[in-house]
Image: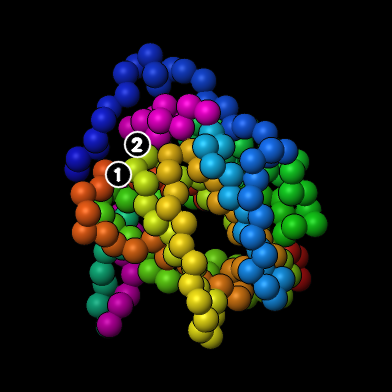
Amino acid sequence: MDRGRQPSLFELDGAVEPRSLDVGLEHLDLGAGAWLELRRQWVDGADRLFGHLLETVPWREEERVMYDRMVSVPRLIATYGEDERFPHHGLGVARQILNEHYGDSSGGPLRSLGVCLYRDGRDSVAWHGDRIGRQHDADTLVAVVSLGASRRLRLRPRGGGPSRHFDLGSGDLLVMGGSCQRTWEHTVPKTARPCGPRISVQFRSEAPDG
């Protein structure tokens, strides 16, 4: 696997600090109770965090049934529960800042953590909505931090309608809230252009009791 530029040990030991959400946050109302917010360059030290996760996360392949056979999911993954130690202390700080900003009323608090490694432009994720959001009527919150190479994230409303897209760079934050997981789908499509590795860090809220 081409890991692209490798940070030095000094860089890996440097600070990783999410910035304040009180400034620079762009809000987009998607309708029907769905919304998203975008904060460019939210993580100071994003390249250091990328290098640390790339080398230390226990990445694994996942398989799923498709067309009556098992196929490999085109990306590597790792997951962390609410009480598990995150792979970098900066991710715990990021979750705290997100929960302080969005609170319980927006579908939070955020608890679990998932990380996905897109090794190159051939890795992707198909159109989908978070399964917890699809199965419950209550609002849910998903916050995505993009690290490494820039990739395009596309969104489309369920049932048809104009799609939207966002080119996410290293350190950018995208938060999907309200009914977004029920009424919209999103994807990171394959790309034929030369593309280095990208890590998607996803904070999610759990389903409400009952």
Spot occupied by residue 147 in the image (x, y as percentages of width and height): 42, 41
Reply yes or no: does residue 61 show up in magenta: yes
- Residue ID for mark 1: 197
Identify the residue at image location x=48%, y=72%.
163
Can you see residue 67? Answer: yes
Q: Which quadrant would residue 40 be assigned to in this image?
A: top right
Vertical comparison of 25 with 46: above or below: below
Spot occupied by residue 112 in the image (x, y as percentages of width and height): 59, 50
The residue carrying pointer 2 sits among few (fewer than 14), some (14 to 19) or many (20 or more) residues within 10 Å by Cα, namely some
Q: Which quadrant would residue 33 be assigned to in this image?
A: bottom right
Residue 92: mark = none
Q: How is the image coloured?
A: rainbow
Q: Residue furthest right?
A: 105
Kind of residue indicated by mark 1: Pro
202 on left or right of 132: left
Query: Dots 2 and 1: beta carbons under 8 Å?
Result: yes
- Residue ID for mark 2: 54
Q: Residue furthest bottom?
A: 159
**Which stretch did the figure color magenta?**
44-67
Spot occupied by residue 67 in the image (x, y as percentages of width and height): 27, 82
Is the C terminus in the top left, top right, bottom left or bottom right quadrant?
bottom right
82 on left or right of 170: right
